[in-house]
């Protein structure tokens, strides 16, 4: 497919990026720590680590891991929310020549056991709040070393002791657990101080992450993301940002969990590369607390998912924040709804820019130009050094235009090597000519903008007509009395499937008839919801993505 989207690139964004400027993430980190040594790197709850601190602490942790006898490429699991220990453990693991396995702290014992066994992780770094989950399955995993940490472990005295005491004794946020032989995080750092960090040569072919997918299409799989994949995506993301951001001057709000690929790459890594300052939000679900933290910092960038932005808009006090330095808001992970985007711009003065990616693409594949002033409903343009193809069910490439709807396929240096130990599943998602089948259905318009009409598996078939939930949700979300909505297909004797909407009301006076009347004005007959259910909340993943499969 011709790269017509290059004509829409903002001035200063290159068609291709230099993939050979850095040999690995370790290379990028070490250069950033030298270049930005005295600048703030990561802050949490009012405590800041500078780049020189990250350099020292990650060196110590890496030396500790090497002291355990771990060889190049062995897997280390990290199971933490957004705390200062996360970047230290992450970078220490990579500097030691090891592979990071990010683990969702809210996993059930079954999910945790699967991921530890599947990845073959022999070390896990875990925050104590979730140690009881690990305790249940530890004996059935290959894990030999458990490093435990408490929320305030990298805070200075006496704040460290106070925070850890309150979390454990006052708020009772740490369920009882017992695992003999665990190593406290601070002890691991102390042991590393006296040890040498041996330089392990890394190149683009070495695996940096086993990044597990959500498992919504079956068993959770580890995407093999190499240092080359990640270096490419950091080069692509920073190239897209470069005309609009300045090295060493950006402060980014990091509320999405760092174990998720979006937040890890877009926030933790990209802004590390350019000397930015990550403000780590440990519990963004505490919206009043989140807004209070936002009031304490002059931020320039924020990333999130639609539900996060929507939640902030509905939290008292958010509209009174100082947005004078704020300039970039990036939404991904799920569709950004027009109603949310328009309200966001009205309140903050900053457009909500939609981006698109997958775990398998490290994750960025398409981003809207940061020059946009209004919501356009598109997922953006394929980013530098990226090729995009729209293909039909037989794999034939389609052309441009709204009538050329097919599966979005991506090819570029950021596309994963494959799924860990799953060659058959890798073969199912990769075409013979090296494109990743995304499972998303969409088209490319005549200017090169990509629009998703939906996920293949979420499509609703009503009497032979395709109905896309995103369209239904976008219409319903525009009703002023609706806070959140999800649309799913349910079995129907007459039409095969019927549209059902599940709605969280903003105003309790909203009725089914009022909603249906609104939909009749916006949707053709076969797209109209046949069933409406009101709920107090919708099921969501840990990054706030609405889980339609659970509603189905």
Image: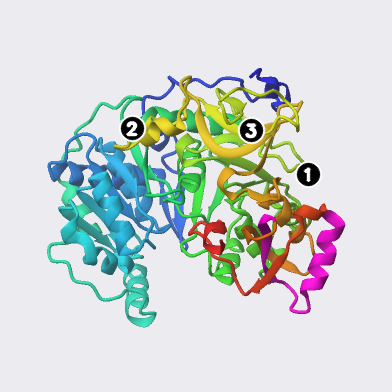
Q: Position of residue 489 (x, y in %)?
A: 63, 57
- State whether residue 389 is above or below residue 376: above
Which residue: 75% across, 75% down?
Answer: 507
Residue at disc 1, secondary structure:
loop
Marks 1 and 3, the one that precedes in the sequence: 1
Cα gap from disc 1 to disc 2, whole angstroms: 43 Å
The one of 457 and 382 positioned closer to us in this rendering: 457
Q: Does residue 87 appear to the left or right of 304 in the view shown? A: left
Residue at disc 3, secondary structure:
strand
Q: Does residue 479 appear to the left or right of 100 in the view shown? A: right
The one of 27 and 365 positioned closer to us in this rendering: 365
Whether 401 is among the magenta residues is no
- Label at residue 374: 1
- Point out the residue furthest to the front here: 494
Name the residue beneath numbered marker 2.
423
- State whether residue 16 is above or below residue 360: above
The answer to whether residue 183 shows anywhere in this view is no
Name the residue beneath numbered marker 3.
406
The one of 56 and 523 positioned closer to us in this rendering: 523
Whether 514 is among the magenta residues is yes
């Amino acid at each position: 497919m011709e790269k017509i989207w290059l004509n829409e690139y903002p001035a200063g964004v290159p068609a291709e990026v230099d993939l050979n400027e850095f040999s690995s993430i370790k290379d990028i980190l070490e250069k950033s720590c030298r270049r930005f040594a005295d600048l703030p790197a990561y802050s949490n709850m009012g405590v800041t680590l500078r780049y020189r601190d990250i350099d020292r602490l990650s060196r110590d942790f890496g030396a500790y891991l090497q002291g355990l006898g771990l060889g190049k490429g062995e897997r280390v699991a990290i199971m933490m929310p957004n705390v200062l220990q996360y970047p230290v453990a992450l970078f220490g693991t990579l500097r030691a020549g090891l592979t990071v396995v990010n683990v969702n702290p809210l996993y059930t014992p079954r999910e945790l056991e699967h991921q530890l066994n599947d990845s073959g992780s022999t070390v896990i770094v875990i925050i104590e709040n979730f140690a009881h989950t690990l305790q249940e399955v530890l004996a059935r995993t290959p894990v030999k070393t458990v490093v435990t940490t408490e929320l305030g472990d990298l805070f200075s005295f006496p704040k460290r002791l106070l925070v850890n005491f309150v979390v454990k004794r006052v708020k009772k946020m740490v369920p009882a657990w017992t695992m003999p032989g665990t190593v406290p995080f601070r002890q691991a750092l102390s042991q590393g101080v006296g040890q040498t960090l041996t330089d392990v040569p890394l190149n683009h072919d070495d695996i940096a992450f086993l990044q597990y997918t959500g498992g919504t299409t079956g068993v959770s799989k580890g995407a093999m993301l190499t240092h080359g994949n990640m270096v490419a995506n950091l080069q692509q993301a920073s190239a897209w940002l470069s005309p609009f951001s300045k090295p060493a001057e950006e402060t980014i709000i990091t509320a999405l969990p760092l174990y998720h690929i979006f937040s890890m790459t877009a926030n933790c890594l990209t802004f590390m590369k350019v000397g930015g300052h990550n403000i780590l939000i440990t519990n963004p679900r505490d919206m009043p607390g989140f807004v209070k933290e936002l009031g304490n910092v002059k931020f320039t960038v924020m990333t999130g998912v639609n539900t996060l932005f929507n939640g902030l808009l509905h939290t008292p006090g958010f509209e009174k924040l100082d947005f004078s330095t704020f300039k970039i808001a990036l939404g991904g992970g799920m569709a950004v709804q027009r109603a949310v985007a328009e309200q966001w711009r009205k309140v903050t003065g900053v457009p909500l820019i939609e981006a698109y990616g997958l775990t398998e693409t490290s994750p960025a594949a398409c981003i809207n130009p940061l020059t946009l002033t209004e919501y356009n409903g598109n997922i953006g343009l394929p980013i530098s050094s990226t090729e995009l193809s729209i293909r039909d069910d037989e794999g034939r490439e389609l052309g441009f235009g709204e009538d050329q709807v097919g599966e979005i396929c991506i090819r570029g240096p950021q596309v994963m090597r494959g799924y860990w130990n799953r060659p058959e599943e890798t073969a199912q998602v990769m075409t013979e000519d090296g494109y990743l089948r995304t499972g998303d259905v969409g088209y490319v318009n005549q200017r090169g903008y990509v629009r998703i009409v939906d996920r293949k598996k979420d499509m609703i078939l009503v009497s032979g007509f395709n109905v896309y939930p995103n369209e239904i949700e976008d219409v319903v979300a525009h009703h002023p009395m609706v806070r959140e909505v999800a649309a799913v297909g349910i079995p129907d004797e007459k039409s095969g499937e019927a549209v059902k909407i599940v709605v969280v009301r903003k105003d309790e006076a909203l009725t089914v008839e009022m909603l249906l009347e609104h939909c009749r004005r916006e949707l053709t007959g076969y797209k109209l919801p046949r069933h409406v259910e009101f709920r107090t909340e919708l099921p969501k993943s840990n990054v706030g993505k609405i889980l339609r499969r659970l509603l189905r």
